[in-house]
Amino acid sequence: MEGVIDAVTRDLLTRAPGFDWVVTEFVRVVDARLPPRVFYKHCPELQAETPPATPSGVPVTLQLLGSDPAALAANARQALRLGATGVDLNFGCPAKLVNRHDGGASLLRDPRRVQAAVAAVHAAVGEAIPVTAKIRLGFADRRLALACALATQDAGARRLVVHGRTRDEGYRPPAHWEWIGRIRQRLSIPVVANGDIWTLEDYWKARTLSGCRDVMLGRGALADPRLAARIRHWQATGERLPETPWHARAAILGEFAATQRSTLPDRVVTSLLKQWLNHMRQRDAEAARRFQALKRITQLDALLEGLAAPAPRPTSRATTEATLSA
């Protein structure tokens, strides 16, 4: 999700009711306290006079990624001074570069390191703001999944998100929601299920198999920007809203580009737009068709024109045969 879920995207995704809270992209912590400008870059919502939230009022939690307990603690205190109302610790990132530099899921090899990191951050902020965490079901296998989960709780985390795969499984389906359930049964803090939630059916299966009250949407929210709203509507009414049509997806992409190009070069916005469209194409045939047609375009206006063009109407076999015979 790095490079995609910035403040603009958070704003767009939370305009319709659906999300209870959102998390920033991770702030990478190495061995020193970072200056305020780094926090403001990842979480510009901190600069508002009110607690950090999207324009529609959805709370924003700042996420840190690192392995040095002292450095994580120093940056948690910095976040608190800047107005953060929660600190989330990322032990789930599977990226090879991050893991090679001892961050993200690499700590899941040793639950003691997970516990040390969470404990240091909890001690740094006390009870002023909650400390939360995200893990996977281990690094290479699941043998330490429960131990890592318990380590976050014992160290003071108030909530745990569990992605239903190991680091080595990456994003290969399926997500093992039943394993999240095994963890939930052993913890007293809230456990949130994550992974492969693309549809209303996936949402219900994830909740049923994990027993979790809440789920976290990641790639699924980018693939279908209205998924959270459709889930919330279904919760409230039992009614299934129709699938998100292409024109609604294109409108969101257009708003994203219009906002981003006010501060970023067009070439950067073009790259970001393709990145989001790439997520959309995983679960939408029209998005997949557009991606294939537009992926080599380098000019932002041309890309936007291609996204906004009306989708072609499906041609029936009878119409095709009549045209050919004529």
Image (spheres, grey):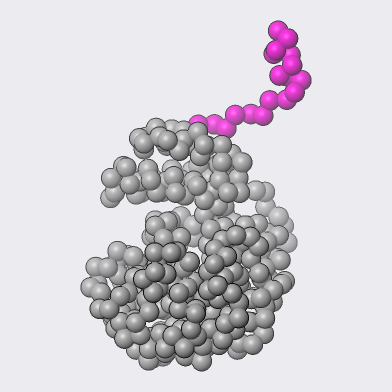
- Location of the C terminus (image quadrant): top right
Residue name at image x 60 percent, y 81 percent: 143
Spot occupied by residue 301 in the image (x, y as percentages of width and height): 37, 34
Q: Quadrant of residue 137?
A: bottom right
| Side of 234 where 254 appears, left or right | left
> Which residues lie in the magenta part?
309-326
In the figure, 312 relative to 202: above or below?
above
Spot occupied by residue 79 in the image (x, y as percentages of width and height): 32, 78
Please tell me whether residue 320 belongs to the stretch shown in magenta.
Answer: yes
Spot occupied by residue 16 in the image (x, y as percentages of width and height): 53, 58
State how many labels appear.
0
| Side of 281 where 320 appears, left or right | right
Spot occupied by residue 10 in the image (x, y as percentages of width and height): 44, 60
Q: Nearer the viewer, residue 189 or 21?
A: 189
Q: Nearer the viewer, residue 310 or 96?
A: 96
Residue name at image x 44 percent, y 85 percent: 113
Question: Would residue 112 be visible to someone looking at this image?
Answer: yes
Q: Nearer the viewer, residue 70 or 139?
A: 139
| Side of 217 where 206 appears, left or right | right
